[in-house]
Amino acid sequence: CSGSARLSKTFRNSGIEAYGIDSRRNVHVPLAPTITLDLSEPVQDELLTSWYEDKNVVFNHMAPPCGTCSRARERPPPAGCDERYVPRPLRTEEEPYGLMDRSANEVMKVVRANYVYVVIFHLAVWCSIRGIRWSIENPSNSILWHMGLFKILLTLPGVCDVDFDACMHGGSRPKRQD
């Protein structure tokens, strides 16, 4: 999910053809051309791999949504905040695929996010098989990294885990990413 498509813009500014991919729910204004696909919808991921083959893609950066895996959900609410409106944890390290004692709406958020994570996993494997380089970005402390699928990716030849601090590259705050 490309969000603002800043990375795509950076590639394009360097003379490399690049596109962002995000759903219609993206709240950011893309800074580069963006393809609208909803990877939480099963038919959309087939369109993506077909497009990759047509465009002869050589690198794929993936930044799946981190909201349901965010550790920020574990923080206590600010003083005076109405707790009914505070997002609560939807996953734990022990249950990275989701807590089932949540509301129907919360469970649906987790299910949709899990589907995107499965698509990202399959896309990373698909890229590896075809010799396409790839990377996956999410906060270092994200529960995403506790999912078995992402642990499996680390066993693929040529795959390594990298911590990246955005503040070292112009980011406005310390935001450690894997």
Image (cartoon, grey):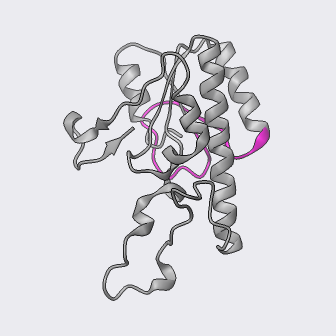
Q: Position of residue 172 (x, y in %)?
A: 22, 47
Q: Is residue 116 left or right of residue 43?
A: left
Q: Which residues are magenta?
A: 21-42
Q: Is residue 21 visible?
A: no
**In the picture, which quadrant includes the N terminus?**
top right
101 over 124 or under it: above or below: below
> Which of these two is toward me, 140 or 24?
140
Q: Is residue 169 left or right of residue 110?
A: left
Q: Position of residue 142 (x, y in %)?
A: 44, 50
Q: Residue furthest right?
A: 43
98 over 49 or under it: above or below: below
**In the picture, which quadrant includes the C terminus?**
top left
> Which of these two is toward me, 74 or 53?
74
Q: Is residue 138 left or right of residue 115?
A: left
Q: Residue at x 56, y 37 (%)?
A: 150
1 over 135 or under it: above or below: below
Q: Position of residue 170 (x, y in %)?
A: 21, 37
Q: How many marks?
A: 0
Q: Quadrant of residue 43?
A: top right
Q: Quadrant of residue 72?
A: bottom left
Q: Residue at x 58, y 10 (%)?
A: 131
Q: Is residue 169 left or right of residue 64?
A: left
Q: Is residue 55 visible?
A: yes
> Does the magenta-highlighted stretch encompass residue 99?
no
Q: Position of residue 148 (x, y in %)?
A: 60, 42
> Which of these two is toward me, 21 or 116?
116
Q: Residue at x 55, y 61 (%)?
A: 91
Q: Main secondary structure of the magenta part?
A: loop
> Which of these two is toward me, 79 or 12?
79
Q: Residue at x 45, y 67 (%)?
A: 73
